[in-house]
Image (spheres, rainbow, N blue to C red):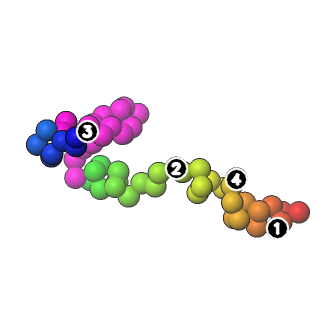
Amino acid sequence: MIANETQRTPCEVFSRSMGFIRPTRNFNIGKYSEFCERKTFTESNCLTTGARHIELMKKAA
């Protein structure tokens, strides 16, 4: 059975900021804006995978 929204436990999101790991709810407006603009790493977007890597390797040869 799936719980409704009132029964769920809120999830705390942490991020490294200025060398410290802190919850994002404690960020000021500027730091939170910077956090939202960050790009997350995914293996499919990695330079060493996929067509982009093959294209760059051909140019380097």
Q: Which residue is denoted by mark 1 in the rendering?
A: 59
Q: Which residue is denoted by mark 3 in the rendering?
A: 11
Q: Which residue is denoted by mark 2 in the rendering?
A: 41
Mark 1 vs mark 2, foreground winner is 2
Tag 2–tag 3 contact (CB < 8 Å)? no
> What x and y, as percent, mark residue 32?
28, 51
> What x and y, as percent, mark residue 13?
30, 40
Name the N-terminal-most of marks 1 and 2. 2
Mark 3 vs mark 1, foreground winner is 3
Res. 36 image quadrant: bottom left
> What x and y, as percent, mark residue 39?
46, 55
Name the N-terminal-most of marks 2 and 4. 2
Q: Nearer the viewer, residue 18 or 11?
A: 11
Mark 1 vs mark 4, foreground winner is 4
**Type of amino acid under label 1:** Lys
> Secondary structure under badge 2?
loop
**Residue 48 located left or right of residue 41:** right
What residue do we see at 35% from left, 32% from top? Answer: 21
Magenta stretch encompasses residue 32? no
**Residue 55 located left or right of residue 3:** right
Mark 4 vs mark 3, foreground winner is 3
Q: Whole-Å distance between the Cαs marked 4 and 3?
A: 33 Å
Mark 2 vs mark 3, foreground winner is 3
Q: Which residue is denoted by mark 4 in the rendering?
A: 48
What residue do we see at 15% from left, 46% from top? Answer: 5
Name the N-terminal-most of marks 4 and 3. 3
Q: Is residue 38 above or below residue 26?
A: below
> Secondary structure under badge 4?
loop
